[in-house]
Amino acid sequence: MFQDDASQPRTPSPARPAAGPASLARGREFLSIPGPTNVPESVLGAMHRPAVDIYDDDLLDTTRRSLQDLKAVFRTEGSTYIYIANGHGAWEAALTNTLSRGDRVLVLESGRFAKGWGDQGDMLGLAVEVLPGGWRCAVDPAAVEARLRADRAHEIRAVLVVQIDTASGVVNDIPAIRAAIDAARHPALFMVDGIASIGCMPFEMDAWSVDVALTCSQKGLMMTPGLSFAAASAKAMAAHATAGLRTAYWDWTSRDMPENYRKFCGTAPEHMLFGLQASLGLLFAEGLENAWARHAALADAVQAAVAVWAEGGAMEFNILDPAQRAASVTTILTPGFDPQRLRAFAREQLGLVLGSGIGDLTGKAFRIAHMGYANAPMVMGTLGATEVALAALGVPHRAGGLGAAATALARHFAGPR
Ligand SMILES: *Cc1c(COP(=O)(O)O)cnc(C)c1O
């Protein structure tokens, strides 16, 4: 969550402060980037223990519970898998376990991440087709339906989409895309990257008939980077039986064997499992629905502030339709100023780490995360410090973003309690 200032040796000269006003960054650093996100102290504490025997009963139980708990996170009765990998590993697991060389997959563009997943498929020898979308709006379910209807021979074997694109800040309507696939009566597997959304907004693998769902540890699940997770439906398992791209490390059949080492294709990531149990414990104690509502309220606050600042004409929301703005990250275009200057000032002078624009938005945007272990004062602190930076740098903006955010958060509590 916060780093001790002792771990931030950022002052260039140890001898005396640089000329000019003193930095206000000393204190707890606010990490407001969309992954890795803040890790609660109790989660870090759960990892701070000696290694145990890989055959230890407690470890076997931790593995069993983690696989079970992930079913609750994905909302599925399907099979769950834990990879010692980041999200890119889970992408590869999804493709290699279910598809064969030459299979056609349809990637639904809405920013950077689904296309990145598709690029992996390209390297694996899949025939990757991108359904073009924009960087400023969600996937259009009608376009998905039209493309699938045109595929009369059912050559498309899988449809790949992200629920939240962390680069553009869009949220895609997964049930609506499912309905589009069904309306086209198309049998393709439906694969959803929920890396920036699961834990932050509703995701219902079984109710939405998602065949392969993915997430990872370091975003909404409040854990350190290093683990990613996949869940597979019965239909995905049937595709797995004949998949030609299967490889030893990712293979679901091998991981479904009873021995504990099979679950990880080798040594269990013990400390990360201890941390995961602690972070999922926090999430379940809060209640998934409450975590979703918390993210929605924090997103409202961020968007209320940005809407006020944007009246100055130097910045705007990347996602045009407010209903398509994500609950976990907000991407702000900066036609009127250099976002790197804002980020550098925030970090060096204020102790706030904002996200940069990535992909097509490199150098053109900044991002504010409201993802995972984040509460009202953390988001208000982030917004307040951002407003300080805008004012100090002379970026044209309307003042009062923080007040609008406060009003938005208060509105969350309006009504019967
Ligand atoms: C972060 C992210 C990824 C990539 O995850 P890594 O752990 O960096 O490999 C993939 N998809 C989405 C939507 C993400 O936000």
Image (cartoon, helix red, strand yellow):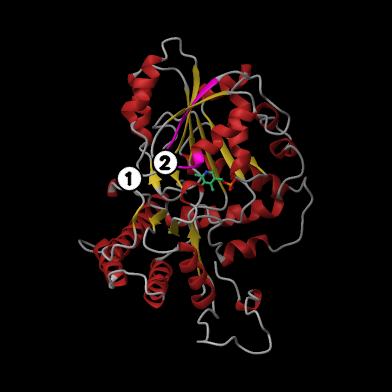
Residue at disc 2, CB closer than 8 Å to ligand 1: no
Secondary structure beneath dot 2 equals loop
Task: Look at label 1 and name its amino acid.
Answer: Gln
In the rendered view, does 181 fall on the left or right side of 272? left
In the rendered image, the quadrant that contains the C terminus is bottom left
Please tell me in which quadrant of the rendered image residue 149 appears: top left
Residue 170 x, y percent position in the rendering: 39, 45
**Magenta part of the protein: which range?**
104-113
User: Height in image: 193 above or below 340?
Assistant: above
In the rendered image, the quadrant that contains the N terminus is bottom right
Residue that badge 1 annotates: 324
Task: Look at label 2 and name its amino acid.
Answer: Phe
Question: Label 2: few (<14), some or many (≥20) within 10 Å?
Answer: many
Question: Label 1: few (<14), some or many (≥20) within 10 Å?
Answer: some
- Residue that appears at 52% across and 71% down: 347
Q: Nearer the viewer, residue 234 or 98?
A: 98
Residue 355 badge: none
- Residue that appears at 40% across and 66% down: 379
Residue 6 is inside the magenta segment: no
Secondary structure beneath dot 1 equals helix
Residue 158 x, y percent position in the rendering: 50, 24
Residue 18 x, y percent position in the rendering: 59, 86
Residue that badge 2 annotates: 203
User: Height in image: 135 above or below 150?
Assistant: below
In the rendered view, does 266 fall on the left or right side of 282? right
The answer to whether residue 218 shows anywhere in this view is yes
Q: For the residues carrying marks 1 and 2, which lies nearer the camera in this image?
A: 1
Q: Are marks 1 and 2 in contact (CB under 8 Å)?
A: no
State the separation of the CA atoms marked 1 and 2.
Answer: 16 Å
Q: Nearer the viewer, residue 126 or 343?
A: 343
Q: Earlier in the sequence, mark 1 or mark 2?
A: 2
